[in-house]
Amino acid sequence: MHYVCARCHHAFSANPGVELACPRCKAEAGLEPVHATLLDTLKAAGWPVVAVGKIEDLFAGRGITRATHTTSDEHGMDVVLEEMAALERMMLRVGATPPGAYVVAGPLAFSPNDVVVAVQGANCTLSTINANGVSVAGPTGIATIGHTLTTTPGNNTTATYGAVAASLINLGQAATPGEPARFGQTLYSVDSAAHTLRTQGLLPTVQAVTPVVSNVMNLKAQFGLDTDNDGTVDTWQTATGNWSAANLPLQPLATWQQIRAVRIAIVTRSDQYESEAVTPGSLAIFCTTNPCAVSMTLDADAQHYRYKVLETTIPFRNALWNAP
């Protein structure tokens, strides 16, 4: 029998019943489908169609937006898992105004109690998928996501999201009894009167303030910026001005993409009050540059305690704002 390679279009002969492989490029042989396939329909509708392994060859490249040829079974599974993770962001198929249900291409990567956010332009709305909140239409596989808006301060509950233009992003499971949330925002602060480090959950819901450890006097943080986009931090920026907690969320994407790391310093104090001043002067913080970036002044009474400055730098390797 005679065949034509779907990849290099080389004609060759082979016996019936054997596994076909092109002798020139080693690709599996095949002809373009005679009629439109489901892949063609999905691609024409604007949906991403990802081929892993031999799939591109089997369909002669038709109806596929992106393909990865794998070198082994293990490599194939790795690619499949990576592509499944990308499904955590899906376009809406039907416009919605929360708390109305969201309609997406399929249920994969969406489960009850997941925290999801609808995004379109500058608008975003945070909610949690209800119990039994994922229903699937049998013939099409299209999923309808029932959800409840979170009580997060500032949550946009009036925005309208359009089909295709808006996306639904899965941020992970909310907290359950005995298990912390996979996604959240936590505020760390120092109670200056009690000298205690405290924490408070802000997302997906606001929690009560909880003390963590005593004898903490100060907490400082700075952003490590890559201002020339060479992949290396060249400037340390305090959280003031455009970089403050109030203003940073309003900045353009290019500003967020400068952030490559954050460095944190915690100042702790001994519990023992000494009879003499054992820590005269001030405490130096973030001294990788000269002069030190921060100085903490101690009054006369505070100098009768001993102090330790603990510092660490955390590089950002999976920042959401750097994702495609």
Image: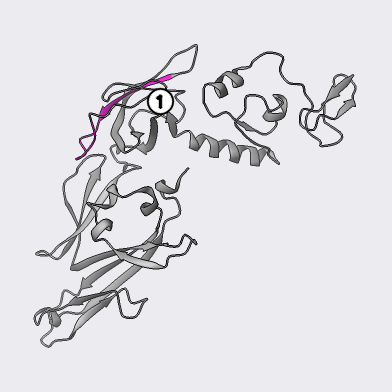
Q: Please check the rendered image and state whether residue 134 is part of the magenta-colored stretch, yes or no.
A: no
| Image quadrant occupied by the N terminus | top right
In this orientation, which residue lies closer to the viewer: 30 or 62? Answer: 62
Label 1 sits on what residue type?
Leu
In this orientation, which residue lies closer to the viewer: 112 or 274? Answer: 112
Query: What x and y, as percent, mark residue 85?
Result: 49, 37
Query: What x and y, as percent, mark residue 257?
Result: 41, 53
In this orientation, which residue lies closer to the viewer: 2 or 36? Answer: 36
Query: What x and y, as percent, mark residue 211?
Result: 18, 56
Find numbered disc 1 in the image and state the secondary structure of the residue it sits on.
loop
The answer to which image quadrant residue 167 occupies is top left
In this orientation, which residue lies closer to the viewer: 13 or 278? Answer: 13
The answer to which image quadrant residue 153 occupies is top left
Query: From the viewer's perspective, is residue 200 above or below residue 62?
Result: below
216 to the left or right of 113: left
Q: Which residue is mark 1?
A: 92
Residue at 37% across / 76% down in the picture? 288
Give the magenta range: 143-157
